[in-house]
Image (cartoon, grey):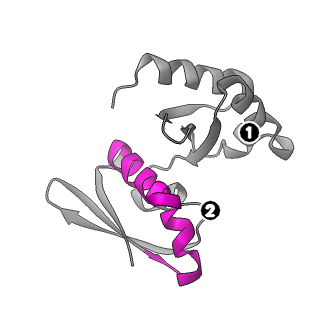
């Protein structure tokens, strides 16, 4: 995984304003959102008390910010990428040269997991592939 200079600047900004470390950054110009993958256990530090830190980052970037907590475990990482949807289970299967994540979500949380125009599920797919060779995420 390679980071472009814009992502490296964004990560440096997040780290300097929050004290939390970040592993990855995806800038979605279409929706005006920047997604950061923060180090495991540092989500609270990145958000800050009452969201103070994340609001500082949003003001400095001029875009909304989403955070995903990293995990070495691919199942936990996919679950984290789909938050705030409540995921019942994640099952990984071999699929060619990668993994297929089958995600069980209660019906009332299905819309949240998919997101407006599929934004949340697309984010989970992109991050899953970048960090754990998860080629597809399927809701069940």
Q: Say whether residue 91 is magenta.
A: no
Q: Which residue is mark 2?
A: 84
Circle 1 sits in a helix, a strand or a loop, which is it? helix
* 100 is higher (above) or lower (below) than 131: below
Q: Which region shows up in magenta?
A: 104-131
* 115 is higher (above) or lower (below) than 19: below
Circle 2 sits in a helix, a strand or a loop, which is it? loop
Could one spot residue 77 in this view of the protein? no
* Percent coordinates x, y for residue 11 in the rendering: 56, 25
* Percent coordinates x, y for residue 44 in the rendering: 73, 45
Q: Say whether residue 118 is magenta.
A: yes
Badge 1: residue crowd in 10 Å (few <14, some 14–19, many ≥20)? some
* Percent coordinates x, y for residue 53 in the rendering: 77, 34
The residue drawn where x is 40% and y is 21% is 4
Horizontal side of 117 relative to 101 (left or right) equals: right
N-terminal-most mark, 1 or 2: 1
Horizontal side of 32 relative to 90 (left or right) equals: right
Q: Which residue is mark 1?
A: 45
The residue drawn where x is 29% and y is 49% is 133
* 26 is higher (above) or lower (below) than 90: above
On residue 126, the disc is: none
Badge 2: residue crowd in 10 Å (few <14, some 14–19, many ≥20)? few
* Percent coordinates x, y for residue 115 in the rendering: 52, 61
């Amino acid at each position: 995984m390679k980071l472009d200079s814009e992502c490296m600047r964004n990560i440096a900004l997040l780290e300097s304003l929050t004290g939390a470390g970040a592993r990855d950054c995806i800038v979605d110009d279409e929706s005006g959102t920047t997604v950061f993958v923060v180090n495991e256990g540092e989500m609270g530090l990145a958000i800050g008390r009452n969201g103070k830190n994340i609001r500082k980052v949003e003001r400095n970037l001029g875009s909304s910010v989403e955070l995903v907590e990293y995990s070495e475990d691919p199942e936990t990482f996919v679950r984290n990428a789909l938050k705030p949807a409540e995921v019942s289970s994640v099952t990984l299967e071999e699929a060619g040269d990668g993994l297929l994540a089958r995600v069980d979500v209660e019906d009332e949380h299905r819309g949240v997991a998919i997101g407006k125009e599929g934004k949340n599920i697309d984010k989970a797919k992109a991050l899953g592939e970048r960090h754990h060779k998860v080629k597809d995420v399927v809701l069940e």
